[in-house]
Image: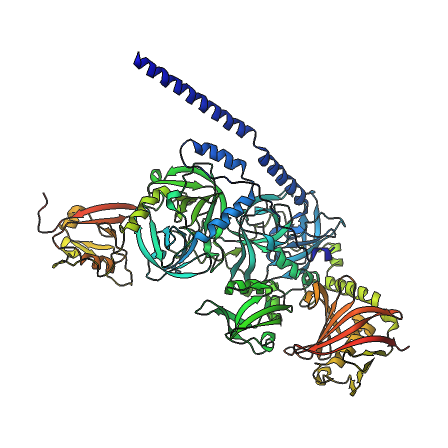
């Protein structure tokens, strides 16, 4: 009896256990067939975002069939981003397939051989679907991201491939492999990036463009993704976008100083060029770098990251500490390369070739333990092999011919001329240069009291102050007499201001569109024209919206401080807009401020 | 159009979904946990939080290497507040100048406390206190399908205070390497978590495998290549397989003897007396390979062969000819010794009695 009771209990227990298992199984089964609402909504969101942004993804093909890659359109008129190493074999023109099934002709606009970025322009529509630019500095490790593009040139139907993953690291610094391929401040992702993905977009989960996929850590496992790929951050590209629009072969920057860590782990200056702007601004050997470009600096990598995101010629804030005292300076960055070096890179000559990569399945030649060839430096994604249908030396399409102009130092000077005209027209609308040919007389009061009067003519300039008059004549070398003293050359600089207005782009001298740059006291980036007349170089800074001239810098010598003139408080006097205030700075000092009340042009 | 593209500050993209899940280790609950974890997988916010919790416990380790494609760096996991670091035993540790860099960029000299060659697991120690760390006792056991994150300094991408790389993946299967004997170059025969993501890259060994809630589950193993088909295995060693070894190392087993500890016997043992001749000691840390075995000697009879690598003397790690020689000074000439050697990928144990005694 007792036994059977026990048995009965056991049976009961087993029954309930079976029931419990059955219920659990049912729950599990239900769960599998019908995922929860969170999953479904996440999935549909993802599908929707991908469905939307795929329209702006490009499959880039070289016209001669020499490989290809990916790209992404960033404006409705067809400007698109890709990698330099994708565009290089294309030469001037390329063809871009889009998800709408069409193939569009495109022309190279600007290239950044150091940062591995290229700007191209597509033709055939004025309403291209385009990606919204995100803010890559807002990304964290763990954020979902997805890459789109044309890995292994799979997209014969032109539909881009999508690979989803997370951000593995941000603000990564990747040492250069060979001589040029340094990736600074890049994004590391575990989304699969493979050959052919090069130049394609990295999107955040909301579909905003946060990077351009460019390279991956390839190792002994062959030329396929091994879980670590790198994208150029879109914030870096934003800094270069203006220069790229100017059709340039853009250059990166150097501070003219080396940094390293000292025994206390501080980041200090270990070497500095006396000709550098940093030296003239006061930076010296062994000074501790505290912040650079608005970012705190704690490692040499962090320093190189910041340096890598700025184009040549920008002025960037830098803070250093010496003997416990903090100094904040604004440093003008010099070019990383000489003109020759940059041209060599732009044409991909051997000195600039990326390091060769092991082929899939190719064993190491001398490495022990079955295969670790070379270092672990990431290499740019190799271009997939050419398609047999293509042929070499395809003639340029007519539309590309119309939009291409060859010039030394430029990827495509056509676009530089275009930008020059844009900036000039905006300024001319305010300045009315056609009626400004006569002598200019500008007068008003000095903030400290007393009156001033400038006279600017076609052959010189003068300034009358309560203490006396300074006259300057435009003869011979303009940089030879930088009057008045301690101004850095205010009179020749103002003479050049008038000269640009009266002579225009064509007759001033050599004028080019530099691109965009930050300007002290101005939010965001402004348009810059670089101009040369006789022996001096000038930079004219224009408001990108209003077209006003905001500042003018005149450099009498490459390694000398410029005379800086800031124009502000524009108002209409007679039929043109004049600056109400002209501030002159030289060598970190304010030379003078002029409050202008009258501007007159002689007939 | 271009102007619009210039400067935009976007709002932070992610709104974390509420998740306060803890996985419950124990049989029966795993299936349920998996189901819940799957439900919550789109919650990127929770991943970011988990990553923030885990990163301070990941260590970058620098040591020997840097030539012939052998990296001189790997990864490690802090397992005590006073600076014990769990990592993989590898060539990187074959130096007296080990450096550990913590997530905050602090740099420490690290000491190899000990290593268990059977699992290829090692414990380092740095002189620190109050460190964030994983408690190995609280490590979780996972099953196939579990969603995981892998942390490591793969390819040495991160330096100084830069955070380690994070990858997301899934456990494909929990299996043993045993069945693949001779295919993978490792003496480890226990269960492993096989992953669907390329986690085991140069420098990744010793990294952490965690759940997406940040709980420690495994340690990324050394790179393993399948010698049959040239594919690479992505895997982690379950923490529960390592726990005992780690405890033993911390308790003094598998530890290289401290100099001037213990008492030396009057007559110390030397290997030639048992028939073993090692390769010439020419490096700072020459690995103790057997060069020659005296025919008919005790070692010969026991089965020791040239090219065997001596890993353990008794329970002590002997990473070099010098370490072995110095340890032998503490062994009496008459004592029986136990040697563990690595032959190919096999670990073999031998007992060697004193020469004068006849085998029974």
Q: Residue furthest top?
A: A1
Quadrant location of residue A571? bottom right
Q: Residue furthest right?
A: A603
Count of picture labels: 0
Image quadrant where one finds the C terminus of chain A: bottom right
Q: Nearer the viewer, residue A568 or A133?
A: A568
Q: Nearer the viewer, residue B89 or A135?
A: A135
B41 w.r.t. B263: above or below: above
In the rendered image, is residue A66 in sight? Answer: no
B311 w.r.t. A471: above or below: above
Q: Nearer the viewer, residue A441 or A334?
A: A441
Side of B18 where B303 appears, left or right: left
Side of A432 where A184 appears, left or right: left
Give the image location of residue B211, x and y in percent. 46, 42
Side of A471 where A24 appears, left or right: left
Give the image location of residue A104, x and y in percent. 71, 49
B295 w.r.t. B194: above or below: below
Image quadrant where one finds the N terminus of chain A: top left
Quadrant location of residue A338? bottom right
Give the image location of residue A422, x and y in percent. 78, 62
Q: Nearer the viewer, residue A439 or A2?
A: A2
Give the image location of residue B308, x and y in percent. 25, 51
- The figure's colour scheme reads rainbow
Residue at left offset 8%, top offset 49%: B357
In the rendered image, is residue B149 in sight? Answer: yes
């Amino acid at each position: 009896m007792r036994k059977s009771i026990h048995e009965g209990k056991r049976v009961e227990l087993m029954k309930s256990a079976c029931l419990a298992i059955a219920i659990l199984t049912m729950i599990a089964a239900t769960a599998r067939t019908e995922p929860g609402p969170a999953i479904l909504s996440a999935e549909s969101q993802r599908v929707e975002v991908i469905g939307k942004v795929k329209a702006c993804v490009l499959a880039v093909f070289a016209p001669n069939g020499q490989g290809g890659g990916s790209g992404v359109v960033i404006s409705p008129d067809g400007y698109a981003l890709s990698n330099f190493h994708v565009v290089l074999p294309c030469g001037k023109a390329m063809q871009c397939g889009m998800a709408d099934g069409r193939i569009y002709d495109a022309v190279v606009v600007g290239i950044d051989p150091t940062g591995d970025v290229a700007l191209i322009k597509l033709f055939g529509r004025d309403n291209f679907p385009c990606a919204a630019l995100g803010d890559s500095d807002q990304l964290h490790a763990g954020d979902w991201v997805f890459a789109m593009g044309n890995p292994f040139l799979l997209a014969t139907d032109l539909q881009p491939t999508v690979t989803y993953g997370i951000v593995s690291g941000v603000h990564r610094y990747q040492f250069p492999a060979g001589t040029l391929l340094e990736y600074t401040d890049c994004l590391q992702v575990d989304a699969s990036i493979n050959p052919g993905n090069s130049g394609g977009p990295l999107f955040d989960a909301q579909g905003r463009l946060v990077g351009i996929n460019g390279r991956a850590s390839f190792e002994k496992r062959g030329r396929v993704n091994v879980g670590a790929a790198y994208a150029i951050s879109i914030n870096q590209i934003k800094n270069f976008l203006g220069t790229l629009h100017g059709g340039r072969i853009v250059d990166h920057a150097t501070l003219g100083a080396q940094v390293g860590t000292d025994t206390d782990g501080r980041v200090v200056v270990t070497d500095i060029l006396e000709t550098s702007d940093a030296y003239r601004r006061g930076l010296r050997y062994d000074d501790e770098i505290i912040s650079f470009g608005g970012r705190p600096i704690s490692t040499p990598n962090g320093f190189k990251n910041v340096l890598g995101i700025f184009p040549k010629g920008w002025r960037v804030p830098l803070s250093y500490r010496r003997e416990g005292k903090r100094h904040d300076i604004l440093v003008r960055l010099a070019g990383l390369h000489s003109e020759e070096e940059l041209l060599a890179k732009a044409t991909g000559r051997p000195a600039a070739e990326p390091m060769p990569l092991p082929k899939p399945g190719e064993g190491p030649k001398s490495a022990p333990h079955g295969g670790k060839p070379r270092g672990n430096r990431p290499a740019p994604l190799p271009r997939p092999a050419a398609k047999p249908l293509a042929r070499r030396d395809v003639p340029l399409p007519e539309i590309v011919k119309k939009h291409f102009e060859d010039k030394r130092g430029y990827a495509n000077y056509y676009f530089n001329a275009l930008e020059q005209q844009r900036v000039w027209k905006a300024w001319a609308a305010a300045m009315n240069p056609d009626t400004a040919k006569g002598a200019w007389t500008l007068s008003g009061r000095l903030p400290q009291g007393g009156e001033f009067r400038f006279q600017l003519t076609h052959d010189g300039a003068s300034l009358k102050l309560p203490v006396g008059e300074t006259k300057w004549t435009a003869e011979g070398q303009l940089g030879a007499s930088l009057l008045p003293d301690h101004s850095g050359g205010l009179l020749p600089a103002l003479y050049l201001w008038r000269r640009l207005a009266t002579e225009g782009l064509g007759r001033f001298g050599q004028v080019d569109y530099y691109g965009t740059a930050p300007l002290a006291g101005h939010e965001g980036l402004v348009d810059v024209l670089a101009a040369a007349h006789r022996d001096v170089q000038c930079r004219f800074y224009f408001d990108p919206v209003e077209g006003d001239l905001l500042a003018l810098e005149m450099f009498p010598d490459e390694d000398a401080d410029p005379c800086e003139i800031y124009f502000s408080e524009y108002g209409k006097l007679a039929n043109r807009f004049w600056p109400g205030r002209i501030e002159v700075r030289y060598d970190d000092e304010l030379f003078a401020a002029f409050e202008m009340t009258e501007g007159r042009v002689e007939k | 159009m271009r102007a619009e593209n210039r400067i935009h500050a976007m709002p932070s993209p992610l709104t974390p979904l509420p998740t306060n899940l803890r996985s419950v280790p124990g049989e029966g609950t795993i299936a349920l946990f998996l189901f819940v974890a799957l439900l919550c997988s789109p919650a990127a916010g929770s991943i970011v939080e988990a990553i923030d919790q885990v990163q301070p416990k990941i260590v970058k380790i620098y040591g020997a290497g840097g030539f012939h494609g052998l990296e001189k760096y790997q990864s490690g996991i802090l397992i005590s507040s006073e600076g014990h670091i769990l990592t993989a035993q590898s060539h990187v540790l074959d130096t007296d100048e080990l450096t550990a860099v913590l997530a905050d960029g602090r740099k420490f000299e690290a000491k190899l406390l000990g290593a268990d060659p059977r699992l290829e697991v090692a414990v380092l120690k740095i002189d620190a206190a109050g460190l964030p760390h994983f408690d190995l006792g609280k490590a979780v056991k996972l099953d196939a399908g579990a969603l995981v994150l892998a942390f490591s300094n793969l390819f040495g991408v991160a330096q100084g205070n830069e955070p380690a790389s994070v990858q997301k993946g899934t456990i494909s299967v929990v299996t043993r390497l045993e069945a693949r004997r001779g295919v993978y170059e490792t003496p480890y025969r226990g269960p492993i978590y096989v992953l669907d993501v390329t986690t085991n890259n140069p420098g990744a060994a010793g990294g952490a495998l965690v759940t997406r809630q940040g709980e420690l589950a495994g340690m990324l193993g050394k790179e393993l290549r399948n010698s049959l088909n040239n594919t690479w295995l992505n895997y982690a060693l379950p923490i529960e397989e390592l726990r005992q070894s780690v405890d033993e190392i911390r308790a003094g087993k598998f530890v290289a003897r401290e100099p001037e500890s213990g008492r030396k016997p009057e007559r110390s043992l030397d290997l030639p007396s048992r028939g073993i001749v090692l390769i010439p000691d020419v490096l700072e840390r020459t690995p103790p390979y057997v060069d020659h075995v005296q025919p008919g000697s005790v070692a010969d009879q026991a089965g020791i062969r040239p090219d065997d690598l001596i890993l353990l003397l008794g329970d002590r790690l002997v990473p070099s000819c010098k370490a072995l020689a110095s340890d032998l000074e503490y062994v009496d000439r008459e004592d029986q010794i136990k040697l563990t050697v690595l032959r190919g990928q096999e670990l073999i144990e031998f007992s060697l009695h004193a020469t004068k005694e006849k085998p029974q």
